[in-house]
Amino acid sequence: MTVNADLAMVNLDSSDPAAHAAFYSRALGWEVTHSQAEYAMISKDGTSIGFGLVPGYAPPAWPDGTGGKRYHLDLYVDDVALAEKDLVSAGATRPEFQPGGERWTVLLDPIGQPFCLCPRPQG
C-alpha cells in the first residue's frame, strides 16, 4: 500500500510558545495567527509552524554529540551577516561552535534551540 500524505504543519516543543512564535515571525516574515501561553502559531501561504508549551522543556546542548538532536530549521537569507545581526538583536545568540565554516551560520533562538542561516541560492 502506498500512502501519499501532505504535510499539514510542523509543531515544535517550546518553553514559551508566544515568544517563540514572535521570534520566528520576525525571522521569516510570517504572520502570528494564534498566540496564547500554551500554544502559538505562525503562517504564510497555507503553511504553518506551531509552538506548543512543554512544561520543563530544556533545549538541546550545542554542540552535543551524545544527545539526540530534536530538530533544527535552516533559513535561506540574502545576507547571512545582516540576518545574524538582526536576529541577535531579536534575542538569538551565536554559539562559539560553528561547523559550517563559510557555508552557514548556527544561531540559537531565544529558548536555546539551534537554527541555521544559509545563503540563498543564486540563479
Image (spheres, rainbow, N blue to C red):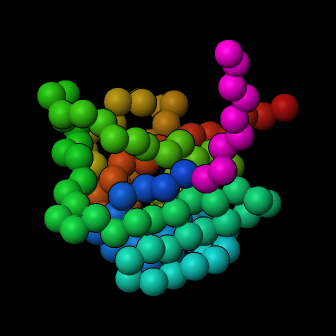
* The one of 82 and 120 positioned closer to us in this rendering: 120
The prevailing secondary structure element of the residues shown in magenta is loop
Q: Residue furthest right?
A: 123
Left or right relative to 65: residue 107 = right
Q: Residue furthest bottom?
A: 36
In this rendered view, identify the residue nearer to me: 10 or 66.
10
- Check if residue 3 falls in the magenta segment: yes
Along the horizontal axis of the image, is 77 left or right of 18?
A: right
Residue at image point 49% right, 55% down:
11
Residue drawn at 54 percent across, 51 percent down: 10
Question: Looking at this view, is 47 or 112 the one in front?
Answer: 47
Screen quadrant of the N terminus: top right
Tell me the quarter of the picture where residue 108 sits. bottom left
Residue at point 33% right, 41% down? 70
> Hey, which residue is sitting farthest top in the picture?
1
Report which quarter residue 62 is drawn in: top left
> As drawn, is 77 to the left or to the right of 72?
right
Residue 9 or 58: which is nearer the viewer?
A: 9
For the C terminus, the quadrant is top right
- Please say if 57 is above or below 97: below
Q: Is residue 88 left or right of residue 63?
A: right
Whole-percent x and y of residue 9?
61, 53
> Where residue 32 sits: x, y (%)?
61, 76
Whether residue 23 is visible:
no
Q: Position of residue 46 (x, y in %)?
A: 76, 59
Q: Position of residue 56 (x, y in %)?
A: 17, 65
Q: Give, as a single range, the part of the protein colored magenta.
A: 1-9
